[in-house]
Amino acid sequence: MGKRANGEGTITKRSDGSWQAATYVTTTAGRRVRKFVYGKTREIVRKKLVALQRSTDQGIPVADKVWKLGEYLTYWLEQVVRPQRRIKTYVGYEGVTRLYIVPGLGSKRVDKLSAQDIRVFLSECRAICLCCKYERDCKSCRSSVPSECCKDTLSPRMVQLIHAVLRNALQNAVREEIIPRNVAQLVTVQAPQYEVGKGLSRSQVRDLLATVQKDRFQAVYALALLGLRKGEILALPWSAVDLKAGVLRVEQTLQRVAGELRINVPKTKRSKRVVPLPEFCVTALERRREIQAEERAEAGSEWEETGLIFTTSSGKPVDPRNLLRQFYTVRERAGLDGYRFHDIRHTAVSLLLDLGVPPHVVREIVGHSAIEVTMDVYAHASLEEKTKALKRLGKEIA
């Protein structure tokens, strides 16, 4: 029997009775190193050796470093997510990682992580009680027994988000050739059931506009009825509006991120859009310009010029939370209890579709990422509309 060729691999028995095999592989850093694998029997080691050599023959490098998942997630967040994604995305991913993924899976090796590990972890996430984390003396029900706890658990949407963050992180590990496949993709999670959009009726829209007719932020509600998001409205600069031509450009959004108000890029690529202005919006914006000029004059040297349309009395950006507080008083005055500010956006979609506007045009106006969102989540038919439709059907077949 001839001598083994260099790199062909060797299998030997160890002093403790276990087996080991060794072969030369190329690492993700481009270095040629000797790699060892271990097992209880010679057959187990032989299979590991064959798999390792097969990967080497296919040009798949071996990870240069053994990563714990928690360690890799820190690297991924700081070196990949932070430079490439929106700051709000980074903050959301970091929170999910810190609160759920690292405590549950952080100590496991990335290359040893299995689909079963992830499936069990997500099942545990679904059972987490939000108010006590199954500690003694639940803050809500005061139970000291987990089986009797109130179990106000994580929502399907949060579990889906946890899975998505983990899946994205592992997919980056695949791209960097740290692991051969993304085991998180082998695990499915329950898709959240979104509520159908709750829109205002035509009469309610008229009541809302009448209620805010003399409000300093009347134009906020006019623009919301065009389908603009709250953050998009508050980030609108005067430079993005042409009142003579009757158009505005949505190019940015205002958000509170990590305790600070920040101007960011819009939610999706389709969120950047040009929106024609109907006459009632032009009138409201002209009035807003007059009100802001009066506020600027009154503030004098204390005025902080931001170029934004909607500002505080000293020119600073309006906190989205303060706008909501103002909306709550408007809602009460208009008799719209139970409605959210975002429902005005729902109203824009529903009324446009009811007027016969093609769905793809509605999507462009409101900046949805996909037409399915326009039709499935936001569009809805009122009982009155369904009654009219079925009456028309009755006349046709009578």
Image: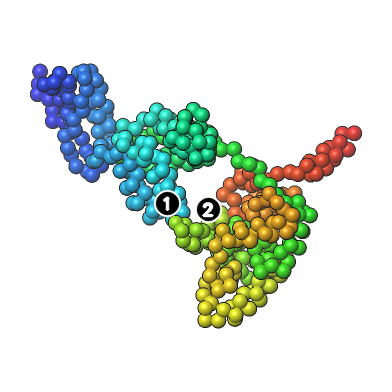
Image vertical order of residue 174 relative to residue 285, above or below: above
Closer to the camera in the image, 333 or 265: 333
Q: Earlier in the sequence, mark 2 or mark 1?
A: 1
Name of the residue lying farthest toward the right: 398
Task: Name the quadrant of the C terminus.
Answer: top right
Q: Residues within 10 Å of mark 2 (few under 14, many from 20)?
A: few
What residue is disc 1 on? 90
The amino acid marked with disc number 2 is: Thr
Q: Amino acid at mark 1?
A: Tyr
Residue at 65% x, 50% y is 360
Between circles 2 and 1, the one closer to the viewer is 1
Q: Secondary structure at mark 2?
A: loop
Image coordinates of residue 198 in percent, x first then y, are: 68, 47
Q: Is residue 246 visible?
A: no
The colour scheme of the drawn protein is rainbow
Under circle 1, the secondary element is helix
Q: Which residue is mark 2?
A: 268
The CA span between labels 2 and 1 is 15 Å
Q: Do residues under tags 2 and 1 come within 8 Å of each other at their CB atoms?
A: no
Residue drawn 17% across the image and 28% down it: 22
Q: Residue at 56% across / 60% down in the picture?
A: 320
Q: Is residue 319 above or below residue 187?
A: below
Identify the image quadrant of the N terminus.
top left
Name the foreground residue: 346 vs 122. 122
Q: Residues within 10 Å of mark 1 (few under 14, many from 20)?
A: some
Q: Residue at point 31% right, 37% down?
A: 107
- In percent of width and height, residue 392 lies at 85, 40
Quadrant of res 390: top right
Question: Which label belongs to residue 283?
Answer: none
Place of residue 211 in the rendered image (x, y in percent of width and height, measured from the top left): 74, 62
The percent coordinates of residue 92 (x first, y second) are: 45, 49
